[in-house]
C-alpha cells in the first residue's frame, strides 16, 4: 500500500505547530509498519541549508492557477527512510515565514494542484493521498474535477485530516474562477455561507474525513466546537473518524533528553525528578522547597487554551501554596496579566515569554503537575509528553485531553480532570492534585503509572493503516 502525505509543514524541515510534528512522525511510523509512505510539502526558503544542500532535483512542469501557468520544480530528499518531495516556486514560497500572507489562498491552491500534477512526472503511484488541514484541502477537490479521467488517478482514495477546525481557508467568491480555476457549475463543492471555504471542499470531496482524536470527531458535530461546519459534518458522519495523535518517544525521552540536568527512567524517577525540579526552580528564580507542588504550563497564550480560567483563580491557587511556572507567547492581554502576576508573587509564580524548546523540556521534566484547561483541544500533545516525563496532567475533559487523561480518583487513572469550562471546577482539580501530592507513596505510584502510558506513533500508525485498508476496500 502506497501513501502520499500532503502537508504544508513537517518536522524537521519546517514547523509552526503540532501539524509539523504529526506529518514528520506519522509517515515514519506508517512505513515502519509495512506500508510505503512519502511526503510532499512546499520548498520554503526557511528550510535549513543543512537539508537544502542535500536535495536532489527531479523535474519541473507548469501548474494551472486560474488563467495563469506557474513554474513548479520538484526536489527529493530521503530522511530516516522516508522520501520527501519539495515543490519549488520562489514567487509563492521564497518568503520570511510560511503563513500570514495576503495571497495564502492562491499559494496553497497552487501547492494543491502541483502536488497532484507532480504524480504525472515521478515514478510513484499512491493508493491513498492523505491531506492535512485547509492548506492541502483543495487536493481532494482538484483530483475529482481534473484528474480522475487519467489512469494513474482512477483508484486513488483521499483522506482529509482536520487538525483544527477553526482554520478553514475562507476567501471571497471572486477567487473561484480567476484564482482557483473552478467553474460556476462546480462552485457548490467549495462555496459555503457566501464565501470560498477550502475545508468545506475537502469534507465534500474526500473519501474519508478524520480528526486527531475520537472525542474531537464527535465534538465538531456541535456548533460550540464546529466554527460553522457542524451541519455539513452531520450530513456526512459516514465519512468521519477519529484517531489520536501520538508523540515521538525518541524526541521526548527522559532517559536521553539532552536538555535535562539529570536523566531518569521509571526506576530512577524519584531522584531524577527531584534534581530536575530543583533545576527548574532555579531557572525560574523560585525558592527550592519540596513541600509545595509545582504546576507547569507550556503553550500559546490564547483564549482557547483556557487561560481565562487560570486568570480568574490564579491568585487563590498561589495563596493555597501552589507554585506555577509558565512558558509561552500570544495575546498581549495574557502576556501582560501573567507578567504582572509574577511581579506580585515572585516567590510562587514565574513566566518566560516566548517558545524555548530547552525550557519546555525542563518544565515537562521538573514540574510535578501539568495544567491544560483548554476550551477546546483537538488532540493536544503536551499532556502526552507530560505523562512521558512523569508529570501528572490536570486537564479539562475535551478533545484529545479526554481521550488520553482519566481522573486518578479511582486509583487507576493517570491525572486529574474536570468537565465544565468553569474556573472553580479547574481549581478543584488542582487542589485535589495538591492533596494527592502529599501522599508520597501513592503519588510515586501515580507518577510511574503515567510514565508507563503508551502514546507512541507506532500504536497510532496501526490505526491509520487499518483506516487506509478499509478505504481501499470501498469501491
Image (cartoon, grey):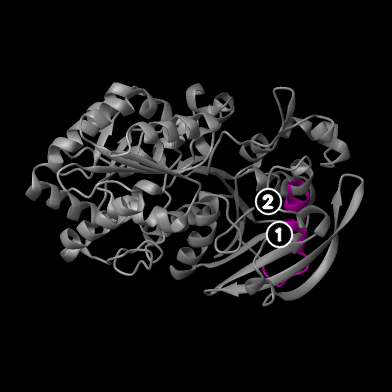
Q: State the extent of the magenta-drawn residues as a range.
A: 108-124
* 408 in relation to 121, above or below: above
Q: Position of residue 37 (x, y in %)?
A: 56, 66
Q: Residue 14 magenta-drawn?
A: no
Furthest residue in direction right, as rendered: 67
Q: Which residue is mark 2?
A: 98
Mark 1 vs mark 2: which is more N-terminal?
1
Secondary structure of the residue carrying numbered label 1:
loop
Q: Position of residue 75 (x, y in %)?
A: 72, 70
Q: Which residue is mark 1?
A: 44
Q: Nearer the viewer, residue 248 or 282?
A: 282
Q: What residue is rendered at 27% in x and 25% in y?
A: 316
Q: Residue 116 magenta-drawn?
A: yes
- From the viewer's perspective, is 224 left or right of 9? left
What kind of secondary structure does the magenta stretch mostly adopt? helix
Q: What residue is rendered at 32% in x and 24% in y?
A: 313
Label 2 near label 1: C-beta < 8 Å?
Answer: yes
Q: Which mark is residue 403?
A: none
- From the viewer's perspective, is 340 left or right of 181? left
- From the viewer's perspective, is 345 left or right of 413? right
Amino acid at each position: 500500500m502506497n501513501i502520499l502525505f500532503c502537508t504544508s509543514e513537517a518536522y524537521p524541515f519546517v514547523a509552526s505547530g503540532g501539524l509539523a510534528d504529526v506529518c514528520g512522525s506519522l509517515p515514519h511510523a506508517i512505513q515502519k509498519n509495512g506500508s510505503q509512505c512519502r511526503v510532499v510539502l512546499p520548498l520554503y526558503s526557511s528550510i535549513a541549508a543543512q537539508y537544502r544542500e542535500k536535495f536532489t532535483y527531479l523535474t519541473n512542469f507548469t501548474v494551472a492557477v486560474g488563467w495563469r501557468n506557474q513554474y513548479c520544480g520538484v526536489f527529493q530528499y530521503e530522511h530516516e527512510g522516508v522520501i520527501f518531495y519539495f515543490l519549488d516556486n520562489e514567487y509563492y514560497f521564497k518568503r520570511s515565514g510560511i503563513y500570514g500572507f495576503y495571497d495564502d489562498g492562491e499559494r496553497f491552491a497552487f501547492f494543491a494542484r502541483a502536488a497532484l500534477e507532480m504524480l504525472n512526472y515521478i515514478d510513484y503511484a499512491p493508493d491513498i493521498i492523505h491531506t492535512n488541514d485547509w492548506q492541502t484541502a483543495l487536493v481532494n477537490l482538484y483530483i475529482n474535477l481534473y484528474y480522475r479521467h487519467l489512469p494513474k488517478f482512477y483508484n486513488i482514495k483521499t483522506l482529509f485530516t482536520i487538525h483544527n477546525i477553526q482554520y478553514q481557508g475562507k476567501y471571497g467568491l471572486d477567487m473561484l474562477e480567476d484564482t482557483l480555476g473552478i467553474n460556476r457549475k462546480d462552485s457548490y463543492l467549495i462555496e459555503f455561507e457566501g464565501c470560498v471555504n477550502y475545508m468545506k471542499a475537502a469534507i465534500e470531496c474526500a473519501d474519508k474525513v478524520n480528526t486527531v482524536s475520537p472525542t474531537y470527531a464527535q465534538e465538531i458535530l456541535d456548533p460550540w466546537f464546529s466554527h460553522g461546519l457542524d451541519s455539513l459534518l452531520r450530513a456526512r458522519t459516514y465519512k468521519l473518524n477519529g484517531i489520536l495523535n501520538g508523540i515521538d518517544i525518541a524526541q521526548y525521552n527522559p532517559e536521553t533528553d539532552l536538555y535535562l540536568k539529570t536523566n531518569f527512567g521509571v526506576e530512577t524517577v524519584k531522584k531524577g525528578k527531584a534534581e530536575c525540579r530543583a533545576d527548574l526552580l532555579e531557572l525560574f528564580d523560585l525558592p527550592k522547597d519540596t513541600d509545595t507542588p509545582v504546576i507547569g504550563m507550556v503553550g500559546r497564550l490564547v483564549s482557547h487554551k483556557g487561560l481565562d480560567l487560570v486568570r480568574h483563580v490564579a491568585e487563590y491557587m498561589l495563596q493555597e501554596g501552589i507554585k506555577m511556572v509558565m512558558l509561552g507567547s500570544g495575546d498581549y492581554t495574557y502576556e501582560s496579566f501573567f507578567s504582572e502576576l509574577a511581579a506580585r508573587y515572585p516567590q510562587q509564580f514565574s513566566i518566560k515569554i516566548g517558545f524555548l524548546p530547552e525550557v519546555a523540556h525542563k518544565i515537562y521534566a521538573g514540574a510535578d503537575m501539568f495544567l491544560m484547561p483548554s476550551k477546546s483541544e483537538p488532540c493536544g500533545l503536551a499532556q502526552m509528553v507530560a505523562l512521558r516525563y512523569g508529570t501528572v496532567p490536570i486537564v479539562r475533559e475535551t478533545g484529545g485531553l479526554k481521550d488520553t487523561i482519566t481522573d486518578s480518583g479511582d486509583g487507576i487513572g493517570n491525572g486529574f480532570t474536570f468537565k465544565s469550562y468553569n474556573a472553580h471546577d479547574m481549581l478543584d482539580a488542582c487542589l485535589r492534585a495538591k492533596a494527592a501530592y502529599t501522599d508520597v507513596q501513592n503519588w510515586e505510584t501515580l507518577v510511574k503509572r503515567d510514565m508507563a502510558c503508551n502514546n507512541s506513533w507506532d500504536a497510532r500508525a496501526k490505526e491509520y493503516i487499518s483506516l487506509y485498508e478499509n478505504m481501499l476496500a470501498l469501491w
